[in-house]
Image (tube, grey):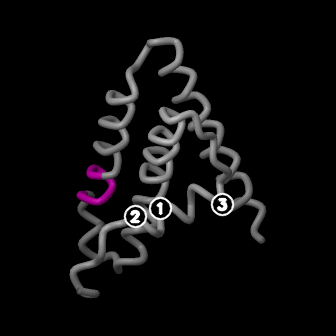
Amino acid sequence: MNTANLQLEGLYLAIAAINNALAEKGLLSREEIAMALRRAEQIALGDYRSEDLSGAERDAVAFAPRLLHLANNNAAQGQDLSFSELAKLVGQTKPRHPDRQ
């Protein structure tokens, strides 16, 4: 596996932990974190370049906010999931591409 991929996995988990700490300290609500992550996903998918991306590439651009959103939701339920568990959930919950109906 590419070392950069492993570094990104660690970064996603670190950001998820920071988001959780922000919520636990009452600095941001879980809803505020979720809204920020949904906004990040929409900005990424609305980028002018996204018109030229395949469905798989669009999923790649949206992966981080989707994973962090799921981490936030699961942390609210007292569950700290591993990267592989979160990545699997991203795949199971992502919207279908219009070209794959």
Q: Is residue 44 magenta?
A: yes
Q: Secondary structure at mark 3?
A: helix
Name the residue rendered at 46%, 48% in the picture: 70
Q: Are marks 1 and 3 in contact (CB under 8 Å)?
A: no
Mark closer to the chain start, 1 or 3:
3
Q: Residue furthest bottom?
A: 100
Q: Position of residue 47 (x, y in %)?
A: 27, 58
Q: Position of residue 57 (x, y in %)?
A: 42, 73
Name the residue rendered at 40%, 64% in the picture: 93
Viewer-nearest residue: 17 or 55: 17
Q: Secondary structure at mark 2?
A: helix
- Horizontal side of 52 relative to 89 (left or right) equals left
The part of the chain drawn in magenta is 42-46
**Secondary structure mostly seen in the magenta stretch:** helix
In the picture, the quarter occupied by the N terminus is bottom right
Name the residue rendered at 41%, 68% in the picture: 59
Q: Quadrant of residue 46?
A: bottom left
Q: Are marks 1 and 2 in contact (CB under 8 Å)?
A: yes
Which residue is the site of mark 2? Answer: 93
Q: CA distance from mark 1 to mark 2?
A: 5 Å
Which residue is the site of mark 1? Answer: 90
Classify 10 Å Cα crowding around label 3: few (below 14), some (14-19), many (20 and above): few
Question: Hey, what amino acid is under mark 3?
Answer: Ser
Mark closer to the chain start, 3 or 2:
3
Which residue is the site of mark 3? Answer: 84
Q: CA distance from mark 3 to mark 2?
A: 14 Å
Q: CA distance from mark 1 to mark 3?
A: 10 Å
